[in-house]
Amino acid sequence: MLAAAGSVGITAELNPDDKPAFDDPPAGFDKKRDDIPHGKLEMIEYESKTVGTTRKMQVYTPPRYSKEKKYPVLYLLHGIGGDETEWQRFASPNVLLDNLVADGKAVPMIIVMPNGRAQKNDRAEGNVFASAPAFAAFENDLLNDVIPTIESRYSVQTDREHRALAGLSMGGGQSLNFGFAHLDTFGWIGAFSAAPNTKAPEQLVPDPAAAARQLKLLWISCGNKDALIRISRRLHQYLKDKQVPHIWHVDSNGHDPRHWKNNLWLFSQHIFK
Ligand code: FER
């Protein structure tokens, strides 16, 4: 997390639209329950032709995962100071999803948490901002290496209606940039406190009518104490003007794990339905 990027304690000026679309999760949503079936987490390796190295990603398979069934897949991307372990540390997606599936609130799905810094040394070391170009280069790694690996090793549905892309901060910007560029690949897009790597709205969505037609769900969220809210807000305003349906969820957090965990919990209940 790079919460220190000038965002702590800032109360951004709010527009009338900048309000919650949903309530915050109830107490206990993120507590591991012993009385329900659990999914599995595994760290796997793959050969990346894009980067020319062996790379890692964490994969969650849902409770009672079976090769007899085919599952939808959520690709979940981390922030500028993170790596393939960040979502697990911030939000324990396995616990959230185990609980939601047990309560019938989410579809059993596979969650893939790759490393979005597509360069030979992909550790979050030194000046993490210097790796911004590698976050852009991840587009090819995701499409040509990560997705084919998942689709060859797991029992998954392989059409756009069963592929979602979401992320936090830099990963939110990646999700928007790659998702809109590949609407034939991803039907569901989520961006939680998207960072300044997000393309300008006119570049991101040059054909609003096509986007409106193809998207199953577009989720844009930000905390009202996040100094980066202008990035998400200008996209919301553009999409509203162009009549592209989307969710604009502004909660009372900052640029922080609480926002990301809450929004993963909310977003995951709306996809693949
Ligand atoms: C920036 C401020 C924040 C930026 C990226 C971030 C590329 C990313 C923050 C995060 O991922 O938490 O100016 O430029």
Image: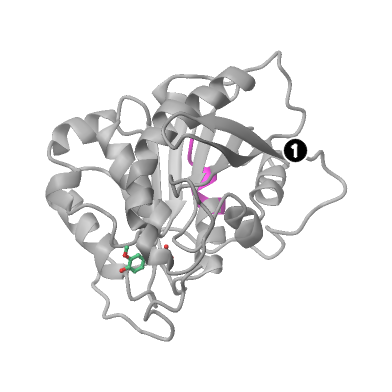
Q: Which residue is mark 1?
A: 39
**Above or below, 121 relative to 67:** below
Q: Amino acid at mark 1?
A: Gly
Q: Residue 167 at what x, y percent from top left?
A: 45, 51
Q: Residue 153 at what x, y percent from top left?
A: 63, 21
Quarter holding ligand 1:
bottom left
Please say whether residue 164 is visible from this viewpoint: yes
- Secondary element at image label 1: loop
Q: Residue at x 48, y 19 (%)?
A: 158
In magenta stretch: residue 130: no
Q: Which of the two residues, 133 or 219, is positioned nearer the viewer here?
A: 133
Residue range of the region highlighted in magenta in the rendering: 265-271
Q: Residue at x 43, y 35 (%)?
A: 142
Q: Residues within 10 Å of mark 1 (few under 14, many from 20)?
A: some
Q: How many marks?
A: 1
Q: Which of the two residues, 50 or 77, is positioned nearer the viewer here?
A: 50
